[in-house]
């Protein structure tokens, strides 16, 4: 994570923002975001290559790529949750967690 922390200033220079308090609660990753027109448009998660966090995220990605039905279910869930939590990004993210964890084999 030292390498991730070393690029923090550069990411901020090119338009990302972050929360030092939130990042302090994370193990094995750092989180950044970008905004456009008053809305979050990008999330960047910096993880250690080969770490358990890296493997978990790739497992989820690969599962969606391998199963179009599963990918469609996730897309539909995201649309439903975006409507339900239009004004609360954190609630939206939290509501996706069960699906993500189940696909990653963590529930």
Image (spheres, rainbow, N blue to C red):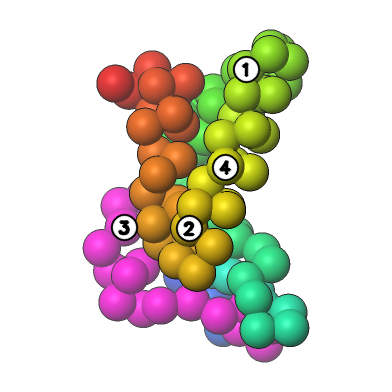
Q: Earlier in the sequence, mark 2 or mark 3?
A: 3
Q: In the image, which is nearer the foreground, mark 1 or mark 4? A: 4
Q: CA distance from mark 3 to mark 4?
A: 28 Å
> In the visual, does 68 lie left or right of 76?
right
What residue is shown with label 1? 70
The mark found on residue 80 in the picture is 4
Judge whether residue 54 is colored magenta.
no
Compared with 92, 86 (above or below) is below
Do the CB atoms of the residues marked 1 and 4 lie less than 8 Å apart? no
Q: Earlier in the sequence, mark 2 or mark 1?
A: 1
Compared with 2, 19 (above or below) is below
Q: Position of residue 25 (x, y in %)?
A: 25, 63
Q: Quadrant of the C terminus?
A: top left
Q: Earlier in the sequence, mark 3 or mark 4?
A: 3
Q: Secondary structure at mark 1?
A: helix
Q: Earlier in the sequence, mark 3 or mark 1?
A: 3
Do the CB atoms of the residues marked 2 and 1 lie less than 8 Å apart? no
What residue is shown with label 2? 85
Do the CB atoms of the residues marked 3 and 1 lie less than 8 Å apart? no
Q: CA distance from mark 2 to mark 4?
A: 9 Å
At x 69%, y 67%, the residue is 41
Q: Position of residue 85 (x, y in %)?
A: 48, 58
Q: Position of residue 58 (x, y in %)?
A: 57, 30
What residue is shown with label 3? 26
Q: Secondary structure at mark 2?
A: loop
Q: CA distance from mark 2 to mark 3?
A: 24 Å
Compared with 17, 59 (above or below) is above
């Amino acid at each position: 994570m030292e390498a991730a922390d070393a690029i923090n200033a550069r990411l901020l220079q090119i338009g990302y923002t972050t929360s030092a308090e939130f990042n302090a609660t994370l193990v094995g990753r750092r989180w950044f975001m970008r905004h456009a027109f008053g809305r979050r448009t990008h999330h960047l998660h910096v993880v250690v290559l080969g770490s358990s966090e890296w493997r978990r995220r790739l497992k989820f990605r690969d599962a969606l790529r391998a199963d179009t039905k599963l990918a469609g279910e996730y897309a539909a869930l995201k649309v439903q949750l975006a409507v339900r939590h239009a004004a609360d990004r954190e609630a939206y993210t939290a509501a996706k967690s069960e699906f993500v964890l189940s696909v990653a084999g963590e529930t």
